[in-house]
Image (spheres, rainbow, N blue to C red):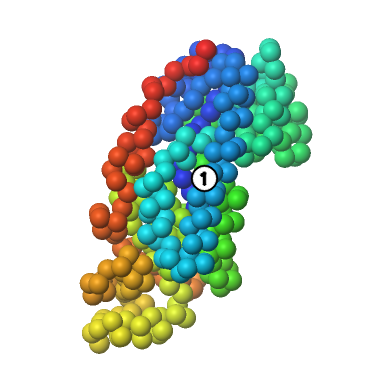
Amino acid sequence: MTFPLSNSPGTIVFLDDDPDYLEMLALVLPRHWHVLLFLRPQDCINHLQQEPPLWEADAWDQQRVIDHWRESGAPLIPQVLRYWQESSRRFSLARVCVVDYSMPAMDGLQALGELVEWPGCRVLLTGQADEQLAVDAFNRGLIDQFVPKQTPNISKHLIEVIKRLLATSNSPHAQAWRSTLSPRQNALLRVPSVALALSEQVAERQWVEYVTLGSPFGVLGVDVQGHASWLQLEPFEGLAELAELAATEGVDAGQLEAIRSGEQLPDIELRQSLGRASPPALAPAFAVGREELLLGAIFPIAPEHVPDPTHTFSQWLARQAPRRVKD
């Protein structure tokens, strides 16, 4: 298992020539998903063909944060919080497209073949006679997943497939954020038990959006209501140095011992990144993964630093049109 270095909510697109099936999906798909339902292949293709420049613009917004940090030393955390605040267009980008193979005007693979530059995940719905064709398409990298329509409880299965695809990072975005990590940090995040533990933390915090940073080392996340928090990560071998830094910040002897023993972690780098002059806060530390490699601690981000409530995913979703089949 690998831990996706960043993630953001987006849109799920369905293309099927059966309006009753699309209406059923409109009712059963999770309400916190933004869903578009297309009946005609060309309408769906036209919509998704407009997205690549928007994906590029969003990737540039993220790269600009990293470049500014690298060139001028501007802290990453407030820049990411500002990026979340200033742009909500990323929510409209289609992350997954689910297409029925058997359609009279154009089959599903032909429709997906028109989306050469669109970077999202592709799912093909197949009939029993189409399964070998879908296997071949998967092996050739034309689709990311196929789902037989005869699958028992197909709606539930389809939701699970989409959830897994939504949990993956867009590759260019992940590569950009990976550049902020040191080789040691990269190696730690690739340990399977660490990756699993971090994914569990994302689920527990109910983050709909997050990004992994190397300076400072941790994961910055925000939930659907816009509440942000910082999962600080600290390798075991860095505890002595961290305690020395805490001593210069006036942390008392008892707390210093708790830092050295891995019982607590201070928010020194978070505080510095946000320009706060208050004394360091300490939070209980916990093991990240089974091996004694990495510790974590959770620190809430004060409301004055987080995105405006009108820019949260829940508010954006509430402003979207009701789900209906586009005919």
Q: Is residue 122 above or below residue 291?
A: above
Residue drawn at x 57%, y 57% is 176
Instruction: Report helix, strand or loop for mark 1.
Output: helix
Of residues 60 and 202, which is closer to you in this image?
60
Q: Is residue 249 above or below residue 47?
A: below
- Quadrant where the N terminus sits is bottom right
Q: Is residue 152 above or below residue 77?
A: above
Residue drawn at x 44%, y 18% is 324
Asked if residue 120 lies left or right of residue 229, the reply is right
Q: Is residue 27 above or below residue 202?
A: above
Of residues 290 and 265, which is closer to you in this image?
265
Residue 44: percent from left, percent from top: 58, 23
Asked if residue 77 lies left or right of residue 37, the reply is left
Q: Amino acid at mark 1?
A: Asp
Residue 297: percent from left, percent from top: 35, 66
Q: Looking at the image, how many numbered discs can be counted on the residues? A: 1
Mark 1, other Cα within 10 Å: few <14 / some 14–19 / many ≥20: some
- Badge 1 is on which residue? 58
Which residue extends farthest front? 72
Residue 68: percent from left, percent from top: 49, 62
Of residues 232 and 42, which is closer to you in this image?
42
Residue 210: percent from left, percent from top: 43, 52
Of residues 208 and 100, which is closer to you in this image?
208
Residue drawn at x 41%, y 65% is 75
Q: Is residue 24 visible?
A: yes
Examine the image and state in which quarter residue 109 appears.
Answer: top right
Asked if residue 323 lies left or right of residue 308, the reply is right
Q: Is residue 5 visible?
A: no
Residue drawn at x 59%, y 71% is 183
